[in-house]
Image (spheres, rainbow, N blue to C red):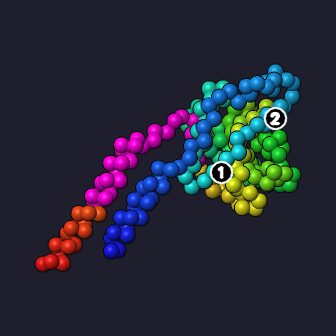
Amino acid sequence: MRRMSLCTFGLLGFAMASQAAVFTFSTDPFAGSTALTTPGRQIVGGESFISFSIATDLFLLTSPEFGVSSPVQFGNDLAANLATSGLNVIVLQDTPDPLAAGSAADLIAARITTPGPGFFLYFNSGLGVPRLVYSTDLNDSTSDLKILFRLENLTGQGGRDALPTFTESNFAFTAVPEPSTGMLTAGAFALLAGCGVWRRRRVRGCAV
């Protein structure tokens, strides 16, 4: 009975692993706006509201207009502790009040010394949730920003506390191959078959 329970849990875990959500942004981030042709920093909202599981979910950022390519160069820390160059994805752990997209971008720009586009995730104190933002230049305090996603399930102090748990595996610039339905089915049957073999062997052992 114990082994059959383990098999059941194994199948449940196998099924859950296939349910990770992928949140994709593949279009021009500034489409329909005049941000790139308007002097000064422009912040474009209209983000998607999502529920994001840090343990399993992925941001897939594939728009060619981003000007960012693999690999993900990831940093997750207070602004003062970030590497000064080489980063294209930043999780900003600073959570002063107030903190909005523009002021978060300023904290990062004051630290980064090498120009280049990228993304940052920060906790918006007014809204009480993290937001993922694209910046045309992480090094420039006047760079245009596009809010991509609002993580509406990570609210309040719990959302702040969750920031250090984001990892490089939550971000990708190219598509990650997903297991095909056939592969998932075959894997499930293989697990079931293994459980069945063990059960038959145990029954035979008891008969002897």
- Look at the picture and state if 32 lies above or below 105: above
- Residue 51: give its label: 1
Q: Earlier in the sequence, mark 1 or mark 2?
A: 2
* x 65%, y 41%: residue: 89
* x 49%, y 39%: residue: 176
Instruction: Determine the image quadrant of residue 24.
Output: top right
Instruction: Determine the image quadrant of residue 164.
Output: bottom right
Residue 145 % position (x, y):
77, 34
| Residue bearing mark 2 | 43
Magenta range is: 169-194
Q: Horizontal placement of 12 versus 30: left or right?
A: left
In this figure, what is the number of numbered marks?
2
Q: CA distance from mark 1 to mark 2?
A: 23 Å
Using the image as rendered, state which of residue 168 and residue 35 is in the foreground. 35
Q: Horizontal placement of 16 versus 205: left or right?
A: right
- Which residue is farthest left? 208
Residue 146 % position (x, y):
75, 35
